[in-house]
Image (spheres, rainbow, N blue to C red):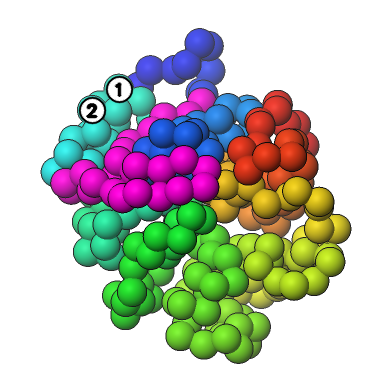
Amino acid sequence: MLDIATNTTSKIVLSIAGFDPSGGAGVLADIKTFEANGVYGMGVVTALTFQNDKEFDGVKWIPINDIEQQISVLLRRFEVRYIKIGLIESYDVLQQIIAFLNKHIINPVIVFDPIIKASAGFQFHSDASQFVSLLQYIYCITPNIPEAEWILQSSDLNEQLEQLSEQVNIYLKGGHSDNETVTDLLYTSDHTYAFANERLPNGTKHGSGCVLSASLTAQLALGHDLALAAENANAYAYRFLGSSSTLLGTHQSFTS
């Protein structure tokens, strides 16, 4: 396998996600986040989206065979273990991607951001019934509050997320709460961690969920345990949210 720039093992992280032309979300945002967090980012496109930071005009899905071919040509040359999955067409496609990764990578570490709706309002999925069956193959999911309610079909989250954490680690993004203090929660099988920050003026950012999930994946690839990776990802995302007064944030080099 090829190392990047050095003779030592390099940290390569793969994003499998949609292509957002604005660069605020999807593969482009993930790559920016990976490299700001100190890993080398690669990307596989699952969808072409027609959007900017405020508008979403539509999506063109990439066939699963083309997704697999993008992954395959990378794996022939590079050693990849840490993968962030974002926008996917369906949970059947997600199942096929996960099966392909497990066939070609030993013990892949998969972080899945279950994107249900674009920040501009476009709804991607309406049925959560297949989702739970795939959790055994995923290391961590990173829903926001509406996505968690959709997955669980309930607004009573805490107890159900504690139960779900017996199957998969869950990083719950708390930005959709109405509180002045925004608290993200990490649920694991034996502990719940809280990461609290004051809500920022002009802190709404297009693609902020993608950035958090990508940062978490990068931090895991750097060798941190999940709790520290989540703490660092929270810090990175918070700095991203405060990086500009517009809907598009900027990425700066981050060291923990």
Quadrant housing residue 136? bottom left
Q: Split into 4 quadrants, where in the image is the N terminus?
A: top left
Identify residue type, mark 1. Answer: Arg
**For the point 75% across and 31% down, which residue is it?**
255
Count of residue discs: 2
Does residue 22 appear left or right of residue 188 in this picture? left
**For the point 54% across and 61% down, which residue is it?**
142
Does residue 160 appear left or right of residue 93 in this picture? right
**For the point 66% across and 31% down, which residue is it?**
251
The front one of 59 and 19 is 59
Q: Provide residue 149's location: percent of width, then percent of height.
A: 52, 79
The numbered dot on residue 77 is 1
Does residue 205 appear left or right of residue 106 in this picture? right
Quadrant housing residue 151? bottom left
Q: Is residue 54 in the magenta section?
A: yes
Q: Main secondary structure of the magenta part?
A: strand
Q: Split into 4 quadrants, where in the image is the C terminus?
A: top right
Identify residue type, mark 2. Answer: Val
Give the vertical position of 129 relative to 218 (above or below): below
Q: Which residue is mark 2?
A: 73
Secondary structure of the residue carrying numbered label 1: loop
Could one spot residue 223 in this view of the protein?
Answer: no
Quadrant housing residue 177? bottom right
Pointer 2 and pointer 1: residues touching (CB < 8 Å)? yes
Q: Provide residue 90's location: percent of width, then percent of height.
A: 26, 62
Q: Write the start and end of the magenta stretch as one range.
A: 40-64
Secondary structure of the residue carrying numbered label 2: helix
